[in-house]
Image: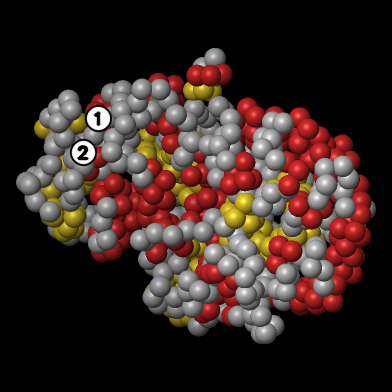
Amino acid sequence: MIFKNKQGENIFLLGVNYWPASSALNMWIEWNPEEIRDDVKRMKDLGMNCCRPFLFMPAFMDTPDQVNAQMIERLHFFMNQCESHELYTFPTFIVGHMSGEDLDVKWREDANFITDRRVIDITKHYISTVVKEVKSYSYVMGWLLSNELPNYIRSQSADDIGNWVKEIIYTIKKEDPLRPVSIGDGAWSPEIIGEQSGFILRKLNKYQDFVGLHYYPRGMSPWHHSYTTAFRIRLAREWNRPVIVEEFGTSTTLCSEENQANYYRSVFYSALINGAQGALSWCLNDFDFENKRPYSHHAFEERFGIVKTDKSLKPAAEEFKKFKDIASELVQAEYQQIEQPATLLIPSNYYYEYPYQFQPEFKQWYDLYLETFSLLKRANLDVRMVFEPAQELENDGQFSHELQLDPVKTPLLFIPRMKLMTKPMRVALEQYIQEGGVVYFSFANDSWVLDWQELAGVETDCKFGVPDFKKTDSLEILVKKDWGGFQRGEKLYIPLNNTNAEFSYCPVLKTSSKVIMEDKSGSPFLIERSVGKGTVYFCAFPIEMLALSSHNEQWKYALSRIYRSIYQTVYTNPLFSIEGDGLEMGVWKNTDLYQVLIFNHGWSEQQGLLTTDLSNWKVEQSTIAYEHKESNKIEFSLSRKSVCHLTLFKH
């Protein structure tokens, strides 16, 4: 853990982004010290251990020549309040964007913020002055360069952004070399969102010490919404920096107060289970202004708080205390998290743009991998990511990083829609399987992956440039033998989609592999093939693509059962396993004591079954009622968006 308290103990950061209710982003100009004193005390009383204050550059640098001395004095007052209440802070320097509007210093005029030498030098003077003034406070946890800088500076080259970040962070480190620094850009990078940007995470991580995620998910799928936290954390963690959820939340203009609390709960427990080191919500207070920008034109922004304007608390405020003690205990060094992960491959073309690729009409690649991730999680699996190294042509063809694909450490790999892959990755994949790795992949029309047919063990009737479709909207699938969670003779019904070549299927003429499932006409649907010491599972339909385009939850759950059944061939006797649609589990061990968290991501009550391979164990404590179904099984029920905390002891 990178974040530690004054006693040197690991700490899970739990807090809010902060503006006072009376002034919001005019905090430093419309100064109200009594309100700030009360707010800091309230944050601590609610169970928070940190906050993220914004220094609002137009107030601190109202002229280009010097930092406003009155603002520094007021900053000292704020820091003293945090110090007296033992509340850690992440001062944020450049607030050029906030709540739906860009807010600039007048003296910049039209100069480029990150390339103009005059502006850079003024910025460095401002930041170094602030760091010198407040670095002596023991409750400064770290520094953030900005609030969502991509919004403020718009499109810029990766080289210019990297040079600016390097220079500004060096300026901070020169004054305060020990505290961690991050950019505050929201991690809206190609590696996370699958869209090209100058903010390239794998390059910026050379300079920043941790990654801060910002996200406000919206969409048609409640599963996508609930699993976004885990998905983005897992994507970011693969780039070798600690991760925090730096900004999340929802306005109670957009949802009920109860469901704001449900969302907070889902983010807190997802963050802890998936290895983030903190979660900070947006934000502490509601606002109520008559005509103050940006709230006058983004009025819903006034209701993101967990404290109402009359100082009463929304239900979300109560979630901090409930979560605090659990998180504090589990991040301590005495506990080790136990995971038995399945691995989801993220191809390099997701985050790196190769020249002259086929450009299909379908562009929802982020949604495709989030859909796959959600289905894996609905199957109750631990999931981590592995990124295929990108061959960076502008870097003399060097690869972005070294591939970490070890059949011992990562014995199971899922590849939805295996369409694009570099030749070195294809060679490494073959070696991985030969040495004992288990790989699942699904069909992709016009796949560029060499000899994928041989890998699957099929002869096909695929045509160049012409996709194949079944002439039906739904396809019956028959289970050929008892396998995993399926019984011989069981039938599944898959909704098909004939609107895009990406939804087409693979016509299999012949296979030497074992057929696990077949369609109504007898064509293979899911097959299993031994390759060396490993195993390949191949689906002749792009089922993740079809799942993404469908709202048929019965079929999606059946697909998650396929994933789970493959997982069970690898992890035959896991120490702990959980069953129940959308139940996510985290397990921590301390000698013979096990802490188990189970969160229900669904919007309805869910029955769950916890199985353990421990011998001579008992439940010492549980936050919910349960029944022993068998000697090694516990049956329970979880209401929507709720959590179960179990303490188990091995004799």
| Residue 336 visible here | no
Give the label, 2 or 1, closer to the camera. Answer: 2
| Label 2 crowd bin: few (<14), some (14–19), many (20+), radius 10 Å | some
Give the residue type at disc 2: Ala
* Residue for badge 2: 501
Seen from the viewer's position, the closer of residues 401 and 598 is 401
Give the residue type at disc 1: Asp
Local secondary structure at mark 1? loop
Seen from the viewer's position, the closer of residues 70 and 174 is 70
From this view, report whether residue 547 is shown above or below residue 44: above
Seen from the viewer's position, the closer of residues 601 and 62 is 62
Q: Is residue 104 left or right of residue 558?
A: right
Instruction: Using the rendered view, name the quadrant where residue 332 is placed.
Output: bottom right
For the image, the number of numbered tags is: 2
From this view, report whether residue 14 is shown above or below residue 358: below
Residue shown at 36% from the left, 45% from the top: 364
Residue 134, given in percent of the width and then of the height, sits at 89, 53
Mark toward the start of the polypeptide (2 vs 1): 1
Residue shown at 79% from the left, 40% from the top: 123
* Residue for badge 1: 446
Residue 132, given in percent of the width and then of the height, sits at 91, 47
Q: Residue furthest top?
A: 396
